Every structure is written in C-alpha cells, then in structure tokens.
Image (cartoon, rainbow, N blue to C red):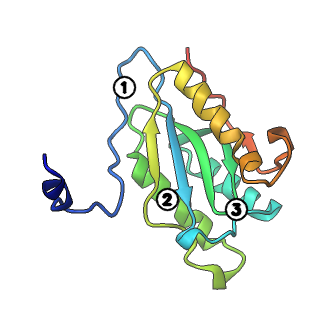
Amino acid sequence: MTKTMINDLPKRKTPVHYPPCDNGKKPVIVYVTVCTDKRKKILCGTAIHELLLKAWSSAGSWLVGRYVVMPDHSHLFCSPAAVDSPALGKWVQYWKTLVSREWPKPDEQPIWQKSFWDTQLRSCDRYKEKWNYVRNNPVRAGLCAKSEDWPLQGEINVLEWY
C-alpha cells in the first residue's frame, strides 16, 4: 500500500476489542487500561481507590487480579469468572457506571473516556513483563521512589499462569 492509500483509510476513533481466545490449556488473562475523560487527574486518594475496589468486586463476572491506579488512568489484569461471562466491554462499562454513580464530586463528571485498551496475554513471560511495566508506572511518573511505595495498587484475585 502506498502512503496516500494509507492516509485515505478511515480513522478509527476507538480501539477494537476482540473477544478473548480460550484454547482450554492456558488461562485467559487480559491486560486492561481505562483512562479518565480528558485525562483528568481525579483517581488518586483512598476514597476513590476504595470505590474502584468495590465496583470491581461487585462486577464479579470478571475477576480483577493485580492493578495499579494512576491519577488519570488504571491498569488491571482480569480474567472471566466463568465460561459464560459477558464480553469484556460490557463488564468494563458496568463497573465504570457503578463508579460514576457513586462519584463523590458531581462536578468532575464525566469520569471515564468512552472506551478502553485491552490486550490478551499469551504467555507467562508476557504477564510478568506487563506487570513489571505497570507496577513501575508510578515511579516513571515521579509519584514515588519505589514501586512498592505507591499506595494505589494491589491484587484482588490471584490470576496464575499455569
């Protein structure tokens, strides 16, 4: 394809969300990034952290494993809780709605960008690589000196690669 032909292609405004592939031998673990609307730095603080944890736990059709909450986005690893779990997009929309309904400062609405970014992990090495990237995000952003010092991180469910 020529450069002109590439420039003439329609521009995508949101990412494509492919359904996770379950080959029966490896776990389905998806790496998800969700950003705030206009990248507003509103996700820091204990109350917001607890609100996110509550929403992720309430929206139990997917299990949240490790996560890091940054001022304007969240990274998390998740896995379907059952074979018939809803699509990832429906689950993300559900917990985003739960958080928005209980948001303590109405003037900060809307809270979320319309979509999100997701990548299904294909190997144990990829999982470790992504987690190392995610947990060091606060250090790279200058928010703390060591990743273990960042208070807005944790693990709700252990998502193991076997």
Kindly state the secondary structure of the residue where label 2 is placed.
helix
Q: Nearer the viewer, residue 112 or 82?
A: 112
Front label number (3 vs 2): 3
Residue at which label 3 appears: 71
Q: Mark 3: which secondary structure?
A: loop
The reply, left or right, for residue 139 in relation to residue 81 is right
Q: Quadrant of the C terminus?
A: top right
Three-letter amino acid code at the position of disc 2: Tyr
Q: Which residue is mark 2?
A: 94
Asked whether the beta carbons under mark 3 and mark 2 sit within 8 Å of each other, the answer is no
Which residue carries the number 1 mark? 22
* Left or right: 151 in relation to 110: right
Can you tell which of label 1 and label 2 is closer to the viewer? 1
Closer to the chain start, of discs 1 and 3, is 1
For this rendering, which residue is in front, 1 or 125?
Answer: 1
Label 2 Cα neighbours within 10 Å, binned few <14 / some 14-19 / many ≥20: some
In the rendered image, residue 133, in percent from the top left (x then y), is placed at 64, 37
Q: Position of residue 51 (x, y in %)?
A: 71, 60
Give the foreground label among 1 and 3: 3
Which residue does the image show at 56% across and 51% down from the upper left? Answer: 59
Q: Which residue shows up at 28% across the image and 60% down it?
A: 12
User: Where 154 sits versus 152, above or below?
Assistant: above
Q: Between marks 1 and 3, how big is the CA–CA gap?
A: 33 Å
